[in-house]
Amino acid sequence: MPLLHGEPPVIAIDGPSGSGKGTIARSVAQRLSFVFLDSGALYRAVALASLNTHTKEDDAEALAQLALTAPIDFSRNQDTGDAAVLLGAQDVTADLRREEVGERASKIATHQQVRAALLDRQRRWRQPPGLVADGRDMGTVVFPDAILKVFLTASAEIRAKRRHKQLIEKGMSAKIESLLADIRKRDDRDYNREIAPLKAAEDSVAIDSSLLSIDQVVTKVLDLAENRL
Ligand code: DC
């Protein structure tokens, strides 16, 4: 595998909540045997730590301190062997998916100090043979020299439907209208925040996944990656 500038290659996959980037990035990483970084999980873990410690959502300094020091570990659940996010000794994988945690993550992510504190933590994931990083600013801020930058979108309605299906499959109840309203609110904050807003890198390839299956998107990304690796 060629190393660009002596660094392992990065494939950055950015996009709004529910665009499918997590599933797609994970699958691309698996197919290439690359390391996978779910940067949203880092933001969510800091958000959860802030809720647990009653840190206020506007206390940028205390939040940045948490971002630097919270004992977040991407590891395996000792009982099941499944990939897990640990906060200290606790497996918080399921907690991170809670709506309240996602909402808090989106809020703390607006603080420049928090983003700066997470920068090094994210860059440390760049390991041989390469990294697939999923987030909002992977291609624009964290890994501007990524060999491939994908900006993955899907209409808000489609994303609300996908989220609804996921929740129903998990036996949880949900209303499409309120999911759609949540998605729009989250989009508004992520796209319009002053610091590192969600936006496509100039040299990114846009893929709209609204009418594509996961496999179709994965194949597209792998084709693009193959050309550049
Ligand atoms: O991808 P996600 O839904 O797990 O991310 C949760 C929140 O974290 C999202 O609303 C915005 C923030 N985030 C960010 O600002 N930058 C990233 N690279 C990843 C996530």
Image (cartoon, helix red, strand yellow):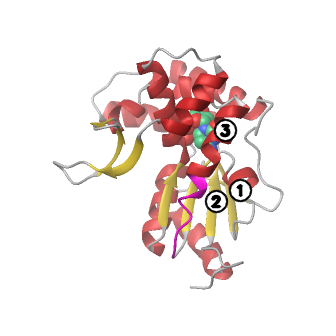
Q: Read off the residue under disc 2.
A: 12
Query: Disc number at residue 50?
Result: none
Whether residue 110 sits left or right of residue 85 in the image: it is right
Tag 3's secondary structure?
Answer: helix
Residue for point 63% across, 81% down: 3
Q: Amino acid at mark 1?
A: Gly
Disc 2 to disc 1: CB gap under 8 Å: yes
Whether residue 97 sits left or right of residue 228 in the image: it is left
Q: Is mark 3 within 8 Å of ligand 1?
A: yes
Indicate which disc, 1 or 3, sits on the residue closer to the N terminus. Answer: 3
Q: Which residue is at the far left?
A: 79
The percent coordinates of residue 30 (x first, y second) are 42, 68
> From the viewer's perspective, is residue 57 above or below residue 45?
above
Magenta residues, dominant SS class: loop
Disc 3 to disc 2: CB gap under 8 Å: no
- Magenta includes 212? no
**Magenta residue span:** 122-128
Residue 196 visible? The answer is yes
Q: Read off the residue under disc 1.
A: 139
Quarter of the figure with residue 113: top right
Q: Read off the residue under disc 3.
A: 115
Marks 3, 2: nearer the viewer: 3
Point out the image quarter for the C terminus: bottom right
Residue for point 48% across, 74% down: 32
Residue for point 50% across, 66% down: 28
> From the viewer's perspective, is residue 31 above or below residue 73?
below
Residue for point 56% across, 85% down: 1
The percent coordinates of residue 140 (x first, y second) are 75, 52
The percent coordinates of residue 29 (x first, y second) are 48, 66
Whether residue 228 sits left or right of residue 97 in the image: it is right
The residues bearing labels 2 and 1 have C-alpha atoms spaced at a distance of: 5 Å
